[in-house]
Image (tube, rainbow, N blue to C red):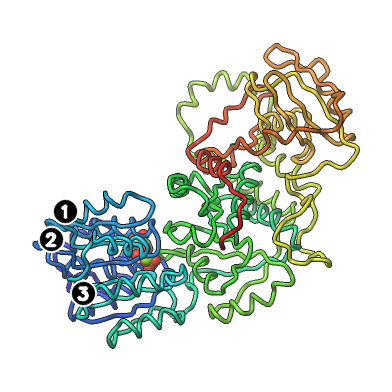
């Protein structure tokens, strides 16, 4: 196997590489680095996302610039702020043993004067988004008239985002005799146009097949009715308890909606789209990187900057308009040599699009079925059993063992196992027990993007006539919000996920609705029912069915850190307030929610 030593890199960079833990060059690095080190040439390099393109241009660039001079010698254009920052960080690591190398990131949404000041201090390398770069050139805040190297990173994405004119403008401000290195995952027509117009007989390297998705990614599609997209998504998530995924929607609005629903349903989800402030996006991304968010719901534009290595699944909640976009989406998984799955939820009428994508990516899709409720229960059951088996025992437990033994005395091993498993299993069972197969496409299916009305097993159930409203004498001051109260009621009365709705928590009391069929069980349960020595009392409310319940609904969120969904429905002690102290992840998601603007979607 080739080693970095064989590529012609100098010792200081080799040392930095060894600190990074890179053992051997990736294919694109192996091909590009010697060419770029040996000659002053233009280069077009095509390689999938996650193949290590940053280092493929970064190492040679660091080696070639003159660190003794403060003139800007290298310009890297990159599509998003996130990528700019990533590249800047990487280059800083690559050059950690070089003296005086200064890499500065230039991007929109941050103070232009601060950035100008950093440039003024002397930056041999500038990493910029096209928009901000153009702006700074226009104001004379940056001088790129003496650069030797111009790198167009993720060129296809930049052009996808409409930066063609900006790029042309910027390049016209650079000297003719520089070298231009273009890196891209795909080679759409616009990229060839740029290459033709601005590059001189570039050498070309291609890693893997041109325009193909990464081969480590398996592509699957699931045909469902247009209204069943959301329940299907939930099932896919429940089938993969350790999922760490990006879910793509077409519009900001759908993105926000799906994220909100997931959060409401107890998943560690977050939204990433252009209506969020930069700060909110950063929060969401940080939570995602830390895996506090397991399901990141994103628009294509907002997801451009995502470079997270361990994504297990990409889920196309809706297919993109452009086939090219699909390649970018699926490229978010299967990175750094790992395998990944790209799932597409589609309606029957969209099936033909699958063929078109297959042609593009030169890879076949596997047609899969959304698992049935019972299949999911089974998966969750084994997952839980394995998790218990693999859990490392916390020795601190020893201190409490005598007390725990007291509580559990008289329960034999088998019964105890059943109880432990039921903690989680009952929740899934109750939820999925009554649900239908989602794989039968609705014959009237029109492929609607919006889920209207009642979803088959969604949580957003609109009560039919014949529901009953109740009064309960606990409220916010007892530590409940609509979510915890709903959980409490559901567990205490042993009802399903969908059985309680319109929960409206007030200061010292609350209201909720159920179907009339549950009334008997509820009233029976709350006869002489005490929590912490206090009577909890439920009465059928005089106020007519369920008005005003929506007030608090969905505003509070319950995504939580660490334990994730697994802690979602532990068999709480009845009535004991459950701590749902919000994590950073949730603040990101909830703040996003508040900011949702219902203006037209840009995508
Ligand atoms: P691309 O730009 O092609 O999408 P990146 O340059 O962002 O890919 O690299 C993807 C990931 O692979 C990064 O986490 C990077 O640190 C890692 N990586 C790059 N080159 C190597 C290597 N030679 N060995 C191990 N990991 C590498
Ligand atoms: Mg890259």
101 or 287, nearer to the observer: 101
Q: Which residue is mark 2?
A: 70
- Mark closer to the chain start, 3 or 1: 3
User: Is ligand 1 closer than 8 angstroms to the Cβ of mark 3?
Assistant: no
Label 2 sits on a secondary structure element that is loop
Q: In the displayed structure, does residue 40 sit left or right of residue 372?
A: left
Q: Which residue is mark 3?
A: 7
Q: Which mark is residue 268?
A: none
178 or 154, nearer to the observer: 178
Q: In the displayed structure, does residue 344 sit left or right of residue 439?
A: left
C-alpha span from label 3 to label 1:
32 Å
- Foreground mark, 3 or 1? 1
User: Which of the 4 image quarters holds residue 18?
Assistant: bottom left
At horizontal 61% and vertical 27% (from top left) the residue drawn is 578
- Mark closer to the chain start, 2 or 3: 3
Mark 2 in CB contact with mark 3 (< 8 angstroms): no
Rendered position, 130 above or below 6: above
C-alpha span from label 2 to label 1:
8 Å
Q: Which mark is residue 121?
A: 1
């Amino acid at each position: 196997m080739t080693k970095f030593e064989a590529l012609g890199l100098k010792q200081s960079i080799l040392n930095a590489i060894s600190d990074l833990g890179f053992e051997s060059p990736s294919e694109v690095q192996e091909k590009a680095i010697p060419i770029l080190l040996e000659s002053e040439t233009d280069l077009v390099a095509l390689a999938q996302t996650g193949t290590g393109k940053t280092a493929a241009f970064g190492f040679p660039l660091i080696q070639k610039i003159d660190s003794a001079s403060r003139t800007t010698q290298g310009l890297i254009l990159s599509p998003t702020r996130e990528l700019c920052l990533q590249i800047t960080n990487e280059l800083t690591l690559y050059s950690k043993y070089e003296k005086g190398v200064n890499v500065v990131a230039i991007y929109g949404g941050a103070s232009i004067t601060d950035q100008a000041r950093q440039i003024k201090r002397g930056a041999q390398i500038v990493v910029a988004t096209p928009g901000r770069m153009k702006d700074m050139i226009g104001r004379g805040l940056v001088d790129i008239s003496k650069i030797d190297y111009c790198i167009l990173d993720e060129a296809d994405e930049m052009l996808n985002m409409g930066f063609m004119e900006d790029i042309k403008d910027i390049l016209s401000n650079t000297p003719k005799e520089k070298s231009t290195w273009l890196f891209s995952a795909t080679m759409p027509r616009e990229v060839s146009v740029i290459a033709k117009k601005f590059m001189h007989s570039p050498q070309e390297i291609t890693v893997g097949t041109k325009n193909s998705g990464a081969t480590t990614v398996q592509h699957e599609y699931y045909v469902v009715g247009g209204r069943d997209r959301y329940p299907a998504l939930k099932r896919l998530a429940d089938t993969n308890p350790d999922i760490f995924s990006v879910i793509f929607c077409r519009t900001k609005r759908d993105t926000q909606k799906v994220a909100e629903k997931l959060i409401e349903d107890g998943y560690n989800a977050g939204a990433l789209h252009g209506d969020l402030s930069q700060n909110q996006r950063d929060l969401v991304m940080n939570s995602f990187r830390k895996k506090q968010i397991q399901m990141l719901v994103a628009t294509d534009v907002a997801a451009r900057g995502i470079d997270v290595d361990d994504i297990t699944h990409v889920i196309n909640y809706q297919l993109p308009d452009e086939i090219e976009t699909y390649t970018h989406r699926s490229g978010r998984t299967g990175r750094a040599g790992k395998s990944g799955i790209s799932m597409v939820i589609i309606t029957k009428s969209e099936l033909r699009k699958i063929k078109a994508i297959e042609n593009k990516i030169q890879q076949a899709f596997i047609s899969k079925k959304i698992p049935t409720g019972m299949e999911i229960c089974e998966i969750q059951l084994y997952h839980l059993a394995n998790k218990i088996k693999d859990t490392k025992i916390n020795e601190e437990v020893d201190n409490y063992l005598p007390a725990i033994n007291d509580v559990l005395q008289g329960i034999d091993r088998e019964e105890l196992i059943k109880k432990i498993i039921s903690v989680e299993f009952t929740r899934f069972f109750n939820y999925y027990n009554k649900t239908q197969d989602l794989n039968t496409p609705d014959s009237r299916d029109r492929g609607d993007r919006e889920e209207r009305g009642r979803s088959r097993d969604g949580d957003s159930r609109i009560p039919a006539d014949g529901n009953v409203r109740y009064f309960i004498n606990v409220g916010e001051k007892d530590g409940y919000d609509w979510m915890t109260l709903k959980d409490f009621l559901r567990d205490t009365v042993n009802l399903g996920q969908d059985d309680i709705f319109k929960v409206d928590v007030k200061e010292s009391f609350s209201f909720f609705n159920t179907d009339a069929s549950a009334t008997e069980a509820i009233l029976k349960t709350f006869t002489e029912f005490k929590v912490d020595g206090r009577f909890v009392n439920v009465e059928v409310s005089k106020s007519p069915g369920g008005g005003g319940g929506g007030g608090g609904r969905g505003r509070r969120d319950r995504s939580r850190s660490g334990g994730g969904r697994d802690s979602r429905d532990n068999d709480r002690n009845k009535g004991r307030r459950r701590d749902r102290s919000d994590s950073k992840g949730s603040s990101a998601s909830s703040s996003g929610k508040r900011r949702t603007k219902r203006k037209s979607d840009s995508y």
